[in-house]
Image (spheres, grey):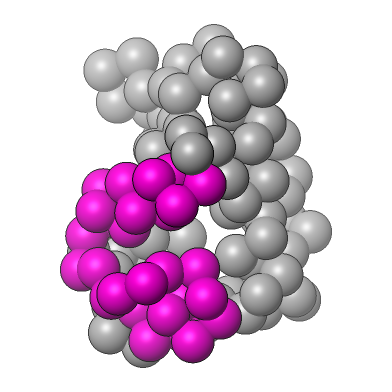
Amino acid sequence: MTKAQNTLILEWKGNLTIEQASPLYKELLDAFNKNAPIYLDISNVTDMDSSIIQLICSAFKEAHAQGKEFHLTGTVQTQLQTTLVRYGFLLQAESSGEALEKQWCIQNQGAL
């Protein structure tokens, strides 16, 4: 976790599976306990399973409930785009975290 200009940037990497869910959850929890907008950079995430997708969905819901900012950022790798479409989290592939976030929030009426 890094802090840049009053924001927290979480940088996740690799093929994320249930084995990483607990430490990633703790990282999110630590970030939510700080008083700053949170940006999850998924540029280096090659793929993720449904447990990590659910963790991100829960982070969006928690941010909405707490009135905090939580955003996705970075370039979405092709395999991850395919996974998100296959699991039904996206209607179409998106190449940026910002577009991915927008599509998720539109489909879920503002909160995941």
Dominant secondary structure, magenta: helix
Residue visible at 64% across and 66% down in the picture: 52
Q: Which one is in front, 68 or 1? A: 68
Front-most of 92 and 5?
92
Q: Is residue 91 located in the magenta-colored stretch of the structure?
A: yes
Residue closest to the eye, 9 or 83: 83
Q: Residue at x 54, y 37 (%)?
A: 111
What is the number of callouts on the image?
0
Q: Position of residue 33 (x, y in %)?
A: 67, 20
Q: Residue at x 58, y 45 (%)?
A: 112
Name the residue located 79 percent from the left edge and 59 percent from the top edge. Answer: 22
Q: Position of residue 41 (x, y in %)?
A: 36, 52
Measuring from the top left, give residue 91's x and y in whole percent: 37, 72
Above or below 68: residue 91: below
In terms of image quadrants, where is residue 105? top left
Rendering coords of residue 23 (x, y %)? 73, 56
Judge whether 73 appears above or below 100 on screen: above
Residue range in magenta is 80-108
Vertically, is 65 above or below 107?
above
Where 42 falls versus 35 (above or below)?
Answer: below
Q: Is residue 47 magenta?
A: no
Asked if residue 29 lies left or right of residue 86, the reply is right
Q: Is residue 65 visible?
A: yes
Look at the image and tell me whether residue 11 can be seen.
no
